[in-house]
Image (cartoon, coloured by chain):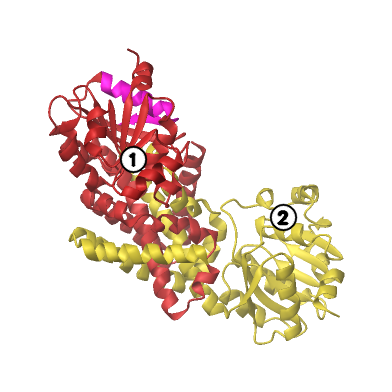
Chain colours: A red, B yellow
Amino acid sequence: MSESETLQQAEIAIVGMGLMGASLGYDLRGSCRRVVGVVRRPEAVSETLASGCVDDATLDAVAAISAADIVVLATPVRTILRQIAQWGPLLKPGAILVDMGSTKTAICRAMEALPEHVRAIGGHPMCGKEQAGLAAAEPGLYRNATFVLCPLARTDDETLQVVQHLVRHIGARPLVLDPERHDRLVAAISHLPYLAACSLVHHVMTVAEDDPTVWDVAASGFRDSSRVAASDVRMLMDILMTNRQAVLAAIDNYERSLAHLRTLLEQEQEPELRDSLEQIAQARRLWRRA
Amino acid sequence: MSESETLQQAEIAIVGMGLMGASLGYDLRGSCRRVVGVVRRPEAVSETLASGCVDDATLDAVAAISAADIVVLATPVRTILRQIAQWGPLLKPGAILVDMGSTKTAICRAMEALPEHVRAIGGHPMCGKEQAGLAAAEPGLYRNATFVLCPLARTDDETLQVVQHLVRHIGARPLVLDPERHDRLVAAISHLPYLAACSLVHHVMTVAEDDPTVWDVAASGFRDSSRVAASDVRMLMDILMTNRQAVLAAIDNYERSLAHLRTLLEQEQEPELRDSLEQIAQARRLWRRA
């Protein structure tokens, strides 16, 4: 059976109808035999059904997971860790387990411990917004996003191919990375920028204690620089706590970069400061063009 | 004569046809007797005329400034400082000099030293983009922006009212601040975010030396957090060098905020870290709603 046929005939259970899970539902519904959303709150059943992102919504995780050909865990990282241990063994033989958690080392380790019959692989789509939840979900969220896949030592080629097909089907670009490397890279481009943005907002909060006008002069530069500071804290706490070492190392390296620029400014070393800022501006402009 | 009539009958000279100057031209042309753009490069005369943002463009700054009722300096800060000294005295009696520089203390000090007959006031519109130059200019750039005005001790009420009218005419909101206060506030919401963004990009550059894939996993969070790092370096150098003390103080306070979050993460003080991040997220969300 081709990967395309496998996807068409699959019953898919998505655990968690937040931004990521519900958006995935929108993109898969109609392309698979059935898409079932697993929710926790009773009122979320009707909310999810009303949104139209799934064929069915249920509180009965065990039934949904046992029936599915592909199970996607779309909850915060530490919830995923509990769900792998609790529900992973309930998958039927040959079913595929994949997650969308933002850190991968702890999750892939938990997946390695699953019974032999489960075909597991780690995943992380590199997209999102600062709004969380079903209401923020939308079709096409994954289009043109990089979707990292972390095959385990035990992941067979067919599993990787089916999941790569799913990733391409929703318009994303699969990128295979080992989990430690993934975590180091996302510490640099996501977790550190989050804490940097939080520190910017915190600085403005302290300035505002004496002079609240600071919020009135804040414009688009501050808006963009600080946007991710409004992210869902629960999700971010799980990310930070499961990627502590890489995040701490990123902060330290970042602080050295900032301290270097500070020294050049303090000592009025104009040519050196200008050169550093030009190199940085150039690197940022090149990335945008890529 | 009302402020509205004063503006309609004014000949306006805008010095510098970059993003800010040319955008102002678009918004004023047709509402004033004549808008003249002063440029430095010979080829900029025809480029400026072709863009349609002014009635006339000229290399002859002295002629344009001597004839104007309102002169707007829209060049980088240290160029503005030179232009105030060089061209300020050439204004005809009763003409108004205003600037759009991003720092105000040094500029207002230079304006205070002008001959008695010049009616001067500092200005700074709180908007922009990371692209610079005529090509990036657009009508309506100032709409809904805060436009800081810094009257000098010598600035008469009529001058303030005419410039406030001009600011409202282009859709912006005038906000009167003294120059030192302006510079302290923009250090927090603009100059510090710029250096923080530069440090983020620099950190990714160092990660990329070993693993260039880091650029492939960078997504919208990194894009927004680092956007201002692509800003025009010449403009930013002038800003940083004329606001050094406030920027250094902002960096120091920011570093304390980041170090505090780092400590909470390192020591796994989850409740304290969560509380801090929640307060920050809340402050950022409240600002967006404002």
Residue indicated by mark 1: B209
Tag 2: Cα neighbours inside 10 Å, few (<14), some, or many (≥20)?
Answer: some
Closest to the observer, A34 or A162: A34
Depicted A220 relative to depicted B107: above or below = above
In the image, taking residue A152 as reference, residue A49 lies left or right, namely right
In the image, taking residue B190 as reference, residue B85 lies left or right, namely right
Q: Quadrant of the N terminus of chain B?
A: bottom right
**Circle 1 marks a residue in which chain?**
B
Give the dominant element type of the magenta stretch: helix, strand or loop: helix
Q: Which three-letter amino acid code belongs to the residue tagged 1?
A: Glu
Residue extent of the magenta highlight: A158-176
Closest to the observer, A116 or A269: A116
Closer to viewer: mark 1 or mark 2: 2
Q: Respond whether the residues carrying marks 1 and 2 are from the same subunit.
A: yes
Q: Quadrant of residue B110?
A: bottom right
Residue A81 can be seen, yes or no: yes
Local secondary structure at mark 2? loop
In the image, what residue occupies the spot 82% across and 73% down? B4
User: Residue A110: percent from the left, percent from the top?
Assistant: 16, 38
In the image, what residue occupies the spot 54% across and 63% down? A219
In the image, what residue occupies the spot 35% across and 38% down? A57
User: Residue A159: percent from the left, percent from the top?
Assistant: 27, 22
Q: Is residue A272 magenta?
A: no
Tag 1: Cα neighbours inside 10 Å, few (<14), some, or many (≥20)?
Answer: few
Residue indicated by mark 2: B139
